[in-house]
Image (cartoon, helix red, strand yellow):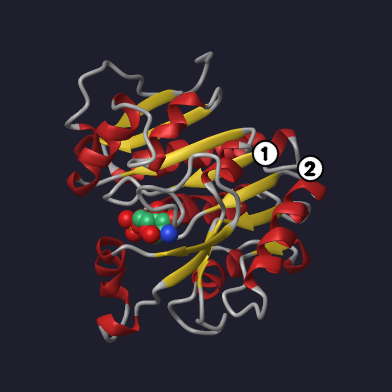
Amino acid sequence: MLVIVKDSYDLMSNEAAKIVADRLRKKPNLVLGLATGSTPLGLYKELIRMHREEGLDFTKVTTFNLDEYVGIPPEHDQSYHYFMWENLFKHINVDPRYVHIPMGMAKDVDLFCEWYEKRIVDCGGIDLQILGIGANGHIAFNEPGSSLGSRTRIKTLTGTTRMDNARFFKNPNEVPKYAITMGVGTIMDAKEIIMLANKASKADAIKASVEGPITAMCPASIIQLHQTAFVIVDKEASTKLIGLYNDSWESKVF
Ligand code: GLP
């Protein structure tokens, strides 16, 4: 695990974009794991700029999103399908046939989850997974208490997470109670991981993930066991860390 502290949200986002672009240039048919939430928006903005101005090519890329709300159709403006198309996919030259986002409207959720896991394997596994982190230490929708070996499945969202996400919905009661999410084990199978966090509200979660005990009560703490994970944070999210950390990924060896 390599922890990188940047001075601002933009610098954090650009640092992550540099890694994604580097991996994509080395492997044009990269299998990219993607996240929603406000945190990766700066990264997506920078990737769009690189696509437009530097010709960063996504035509051969396969994507897998971490999660999706259950019971919300893809065209709903709070669905993660909608989020991904609005904030990234429609601005780059990704092939829609290679885009995978869990189907929140699946009739048989368990069967869908089994298929999703198999599809990831059939595509060669995720090369690089982007992750945000919830204020309670959740990754994707693996809430505290999630098994550290879990696979893609349906999860009940905690009150905290529903409250955190209520700001996006017209009425807080509309926030779904369930989501389909890749498991902690699924995420850990990615060959590389970039976990991003900004703002003071994430400082406790980052401290617990990077320097705390590895525990299901903070699912993000499992990242300490990943051989090739980058944790890139802004200054505000880093304030509770006591270790000394890097400010760049280039030329650093794990
Ligand atoms: C949701 C998503 C997570 C995301 C988290 C944090 O719960 N399922 O993948 O990391 O929110 O969101 P934000 O980046 O907006 O703080």
Residue 190 lies in what quarter of the image?
top right
Q: Which sits in the foreground, 115 or 170?
A: 115
Graded by Cα atoms within 10 Å as few (under 14), some (14 to 19) or many (20 or more), the crowding at tag 1 reads many
Q: Is residue 109 left or right of residue 3?
A: right
From mark 1 to mark 2, how far is it between C-alphas? 8 Å
Q: Which sits in the foreground, 86 or 153?
A: 153
In the picture, the disc for residue 46 is none
Ligand 1 shows up in which quadrant of the image?
bottom left
- Amino acid of disc 1: Asp
Q: Secondary structure at mark 1?
A: loop
Q: Is residue 191 left or right of residue 1?
A: right
Q: CB at mark 1 closer than 8 A to ligand 1?
A: no
Q: Is residue 142 left or right of residue 59?
A: left
Q: Residue at point 79% right, 42% down?
A: 124
- Say whether residue 36 is visible: yes
Q: Is residue 193 left or right of residue 208?
A: right
- Amino acid of disc 2: Gly
Q: Is residue 86 above or below residue 239?
A: below
Q: Residue at point 23% right, 35% down?
A: 235
Q: Are marks 1 and 2 in contact (CB under 8 Å)?
A: yes
In the picture, the disc for residue 127 is 1
Residue receiving disc 2: 124
Q: Which sits in the foreground, 44 or 48?
A: 44
Q: How far across and how far down the image is residue 64, in percent?
A: 64, 56
Q: How far across and how far down the image is residue 144, in percent?
A: 35, 48
Q: Is residue 98 above or below residue 57?
A: below
Q: How far across and how far down the image is residue 19, in percent?
A: 55, 35
Q: Is residue 192 above or below residue 66?
A: above
